[in-house]
Image: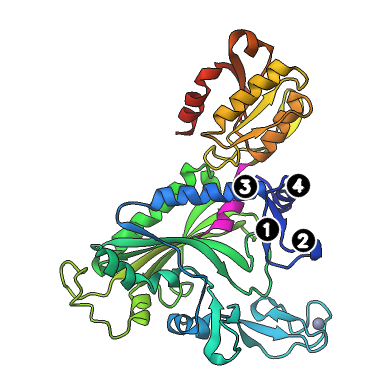
């Protein structure tokens, strides 16, 4: 397993992730996903949707910017803050709970009293910058789902239980963004809000908890690097009666493990906040007309944290034929490119032409990469480092026998496959 610095450096060198506003010296807590990062991130989201979209789960894409009223009702305006202290000498601000002692960690100056600092990004909608125009960038995607609860119910009349799922950006003005993608100011969330009868909530909570752990393991996260952590009553948010975190071994805290995903039983807190005075007994979507306000089970995962976990878990260094290599053992479904196609030489027209033909055929179905520079060994190394599971080389034998060499990233084993069988060969590997 890699440490964070190794991953940050690989991510920049190979075009996965760049620092935000890089050419202007950067903006702390923001990151730009490069070409390979964009593909990896899309694949993570695709796998998440694939695991979520059952007939009773409804997708949503709500607005990032929303009226102040949403955040008044949700409690974020009042509660979503960190205690800050300011240094009287250098004027820098620090999280009060991150400070040891009474003096500034930078200049040893005297610190002022702790004050609450709201972490939401505030802006104004429209030309007038007065209080009535105040709007906020959402600090979580969940509220967008809650406020659309009735819209979805009215449009689809779903029966209980049902869910609404969303992937989208969220923004938090972190005082000290740190640890690469782990704590950024702009990030992306994947959240399911599962609405159910309160009397079944415990069962759904435990089912969803298991389902989420299986998702990570299926996509290749090693069991030793991931675990459940049940929050104690003191650790839970005020709206939650049960919270389990899925922790990943990022190696950035004392025991290495930090939160990757949170699963919470949010009770009826959110719906009661956004629909006060609503008559829950007469609604046609409540099958048994018991008159309950639905409970909500929420698995909430940061795309960027998942991205970092998959990168760290896949990173490996080993030796192939006496040569050291870096290899990203990403699950083939997550790998940015599935197949790289190489002509053995680039000055032999028949070989290049045949390789182009294979490339054009494969890229209709798989994300493919063309590489004709340097010797084949070097090309393998390049693809290993970005996690491409298979490399196809077109050589002289291809022209005579109609076969190509397929080389496996993890084992470095090679086999000859007929060109016309390549499609089904990779299809099978990926299914
Ligand atoms: Zn200071």
Quadrant for residue 408, please give it: top right
Q: Is residue 137 left or right of residue 31?
A: left
In-front residue for pair 129/85 = 129
Q: Position of residue 231 (x, y in %)?
A: 46, 67
Q: Residue at x 35, y 59 (%)?
A: 58
Q: Where is the C terminus found, in terms of image quarters?
A: top left
User: In the picture shown, does residue 259 fall above or below 65?
Assistant: above
Q: Is there a contact, CB below 8 Å, between mark 2 and mark 3? A: no
The residue tagged 3 is 311
The residue tagged 2 is 22
Q: Position of residue 311 (x, y in %)?
A: 62, 47
Q: Is residue 337 left or right of residue 28?
A: left
* CA–CA distance in space, label 3 to label 1: 16 Å
The residue tagged 1 is 32
Tag 1 or tag 3, which sits nearer the N-term? Answer: 1
Q: Residue at x 50, y 26 (%)?
A: 423
Q: Is residue 47 visible?
A: yes
Q: Is there a contact, CB below 8 Å, between mark 1 and mark 2? A: yes
Q: Position of residue 4 (x, y in %)?
A: 69, 53
Q: Is there a contact, CB below 8 Å, between mark 1 and mark 4? A: no
Crowd tier of the residue under label 2, counting other residues whose Cα lies within 10 Å: few below 14, some 14–19, many 20 or above: few
- Which segment is the magenta one? 301-314
Tag 3 or tag 4, which sits nearer the N-term? Answer: 4
Q: Is residue 393 visible?
A: no
Crowd tier of the residue under label 4, counting other residues whose Cα lies within 10 Å: few below 14, some 14–19, many 20 or above: few
Crowd tier of the residue under label 1, counting other residues whose Cα lies within 10 Å: few below 14, some 14–19, many 20 or above: some
Tag 4 or tag 1, which sits nearer the N-term? Answer: 4
* CA–CA distance in space, label 1 to label 2: 9 Å
* CA–CA distance in space, label 2 to label 3: 22 Å
Q: Nearer the viewer, mark 2 or mark 3?
A: 2
SS at mark 3?
helix
The disc placed on residue 13 is: 4
């Amino acid at each position: 397993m890699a440490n964070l610095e190794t991953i940050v450096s690989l991510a920049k060198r190979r075009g996965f992730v760049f620092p935000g506003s890089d050419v202007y010296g950067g903006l702390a807590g923001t990151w730009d996903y490069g070409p390979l990062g964009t593909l990896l991130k899309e694949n993570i989201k695709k796998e998440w949707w694939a695991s979520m979209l059952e007939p009773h789960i409804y997708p949503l894409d709500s607005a990032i910017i929303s009226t102040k009223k949403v955040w008044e009702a949700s409690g974020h305006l009042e509660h979503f803050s960190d205690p800050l202290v300011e240094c009287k000498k250098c004027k820098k601000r620090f999280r009060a709970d991150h400070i040891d002692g009474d003096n500034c960690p930078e200049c040893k100056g005297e610190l002022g009293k702790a004050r609450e600092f709201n972490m939401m990004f505030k802006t104004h909608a429209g030309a007038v910058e007065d209080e009535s125009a105040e709007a906020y960038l959402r600090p979580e995607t969940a509220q967008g789902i809650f406020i659309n609860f009735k819209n979805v119910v009215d449009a689809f009349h779903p029966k209980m239980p049902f869910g609404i799922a969303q992937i989208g950006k969220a923004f938090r003005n972190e005082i000290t963004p740190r640890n690469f993608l782990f704590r950024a100011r702009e990030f992306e969330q994947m959240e399911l809000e599962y609405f159910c009868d309160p009397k079944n909530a415990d069962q759904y909570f435990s089912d969803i908890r298991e389902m989420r752990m299986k998702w990570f393991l299926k996509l290749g996260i090693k069991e030793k690097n991931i675990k459940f952590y049940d929050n104690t009553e003191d650790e839970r948010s005020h709206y939650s009666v049960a919270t389990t975190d899925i922790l990943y071994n990022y190696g950035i805290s004392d025991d290495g493990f930090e939160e990757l995903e949170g699963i919470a039983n949010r009770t009826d807190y959110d719906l009661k906040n956004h629909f006060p005075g609503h008559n829950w007994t007469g609604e046609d979507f409540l099958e048994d007309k018991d008159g309950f306000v639905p409970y909500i089970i929420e698995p909430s995962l940061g795309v960027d944290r998942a991205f970092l976990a998959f990168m760290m878990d896949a990173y490996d260094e080993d030796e192939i034929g006496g040569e050291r290599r870096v290899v990203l053992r990403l699950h083939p479904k997550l790998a940015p490119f599935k197949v790289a196609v190489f002509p053995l030489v680039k000055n032999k027209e028949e070989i290049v032409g045949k390789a182009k033909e294979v490339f054009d055929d494969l890229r209709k179905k798989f994300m493919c990469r063309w590489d004709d520079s340097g010797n084949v060994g070097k090309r393998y190394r390049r693809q290993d480092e970005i996690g491409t599971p298979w490399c196809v080389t077109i050589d002289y034998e291809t022209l005579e026998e109609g076969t190509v060499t397929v080389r496996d990233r993890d084992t470095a084993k090679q086999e000859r496959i007929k060109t016309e069988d390549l499609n089904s060969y990779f299809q099978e590997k990926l299914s």
